[in-house]
Amino acid sequence: MADIFHITVLVLLTVYPAYRLFRNRSVSSAAMLVAFWCSALVLGLDGQAVRSPEAFLLWKGAGLYAEALLCPVWIAFSLCYARRFSLREISITQRAAFVLSFIPAAIVAVYPVRAFLFAPDFAYEKVLFLEPLAFFFYLQIMLFLAIALFNLEATIANASHGVRWKVKFAVVGAGAMAMSFILYFSQSLLFRSLDMGFMTVRLGALAFGALLVAYSEVERGAEERIVISRSLTYRSFVLLLAALFLVGVGIMGEGMKLFGKSFNQYMLTGMGFAACVALVLLVLSEGLRRKLRVLVQRNFYGEKYDYRVEWDAFTERISSARSRDELFKNILIAFCETFGVVGGAVFMRGRHSRNFLPVCFHEMDSAETLFCSDGKLAVRMAQERAVLDLRREGTDFDAGEARFLKDVEARFIIPACAGDQMLALIVLGRPINMAEQYDEEDMALMGALSRQVAVVFKNLRLGDELAEARDMEAFGKVAAFLLHDLKNQVYPLGLLTENAREYINEPEFQKDMLDSLEGVVARMKALIRQLTHIPANPALDMRPVDLMELARDTAESMPENTVRFFGEPVIVQADAEEMRKVLLNLYLNAFEAGTGAPFDVHVGCETQPYVKVVDYGRGIDESVLRDGLFVPFRTTKEKGLGIGLYQSKQIVEAHGGTLNVTNVAGKGATFWVNLPR
């Protein structure tokens, strides 16, 4: 029977990690495979030593290597199991511990097996007597396995509320397996010997731990990736347990001296192991921790909550969110951990709908449901603006609302109100400790936290509205630029229409009119192409352009005898169509400023190529120059858009040039376009 049990445990330790690695090829799965197989190897070699007493030194010699390798493989397993593994995130201390964990293997490689142990009557009494070297050998193994336990505790301590319950049994099971070896090797401290009869207890402990791991991963998933914070400091339960264990070992040693064989070694060791595992499970129990927390707060501090601590923790959770989804999740986790409930959901009022729509579920079955603004629940919460305890006040709501609240085992509904608006409803599920009593202190803290949540949600809504306003503003700017270009294109068409009444029958006018219309059509098509595909930074079509020729061509859109040209041809690299927009805008401004009087255009090259447009109107008001002549949407014209000069300046600067103005009040203004050579 014992052999069957032995083989069953070996199969479990061998097959399950291989199956897990096959299903999930990850560093964590590979580390589990090595740790479990090394543990199985220790069991197998010890079993062979017991079954073949005549060759026990051979089997035990190989077993010493396997026992020594338990240290690095279990430390490696504890550093990556259920964690987001990265070599860079492993501290220097942990790396040093991993390297030092190979010392027991080095000791085995240097010394022969007889330097560790001897067994004069092993065929009759399965006890290995240890040499002093073995005492220190097994002490090192226990210390390194304790480091693995410390790492496993760090994993569970860093797990969030929603993850801890998923990995709790798996981490406890892995810890139980490591603890079983510590208990087994602790005989070396007590008796300077190893009683192989304890193998059955160790087999049971390993089977129990492996089954816990398998159960947790099959039932609750094995894909968690807990992030370990280097800055996290906490009181280690493993260190306390290790201290208690060493004290217990000392007491047991004294008991053996006093009572001898009447002190039942096997029973006491088994009970001690079971008690340790039970204690770990109780400490990791959410319900027990909740009870202890409430008990300590109320009996030692007079209040259930330390409000400063709760507020700091809640604020820290909110401020650490890096996305909207993470913000919602952090809010629910904070409520669940603070008030000891299993899960929750957030229902937020839609921006374009008055109904409350689900935006986040945490440890609660998601549902395609909503709370109508005119439903009984929303109306009641809007009127009372207080936390609703469903156990005390019932669920007299609409049928769909009542069914949803029953399905998710809801206990509390908390309104998040800002001013006269109810922005969201927070639904909290059943308590972890079903016997916990909630009073006015709980309700007050829920209300305080919900008001903070309402402020956050209001800021989110204001941010959305601001983003929409900016989008509309951008659209308005595009529309304004479009209207300005259309206005400049319509102007020459108006001149053609007026002149056509007199000269339509003249062949020369007909030819000029067709040329002008073709030019307008070409520019309109180019404008349509730009609007069809607007790049983030439009590229200029830079080609050699004669500024004098471009200035004269642009003037053809103006009435006859309104433009006087001075200067000489100057060749520059420019986008002809874009510069045409600039010149046409300056021409129209000069023409309107002079109330139809002629204006001058100078083209030349001094330090830089330039085009100068001089009008002889009233000039520009000093207030306009002071406030900003090139600011968009600012105009002094009755029907102006305030776009032309701003757009012209942008085009000139895109060419690497400058657009400046000089002004003499009452005598006119001069605009300078300077371009690079």
Image (cartoon, helix red, strand yellow):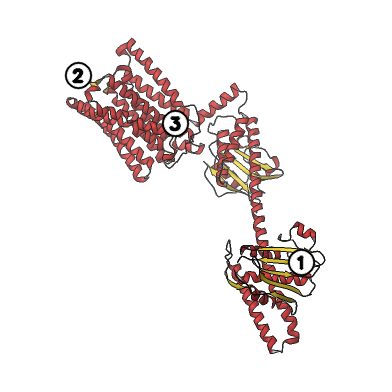
Three-letter amino acid code at the position of disc 1: Ala
* Residue 149 falls in image quadrant: top left
Q: Give the number of the disc on residue 153.
A: 3
Closer to us: 661 or 319: 661
The reply to whether discs 3 and 1 touch (Cβ–Cβ < 8 Å) is no
Frontmost of labels 3 and 1 is 1
Quick one: SS at disc 2?
A: loop
Of the two numbered discs 2 and 1 on the same chain, state the one appearing first in sequence.
Answer: 2
4 is higher (above) or lower (below) than 550: above
382 is higher (above) or lower (below) than 494: above
Closer to us: 534 or 264: 534
Q: Could you tell me which residue is drawn at 75 percent across and 85 percent down? A: 501
Which residue in the rendered view is the most extreme toward the right? 666
Query: CA–CA distance between discs 2 and 1?
Result: 118 Å
Q: Could you tell me which residue is drawn at 35 percent across and 12 percent down? A: 254
Query: CA–CA distance between discs 2 and 3?
Result: 42 Å
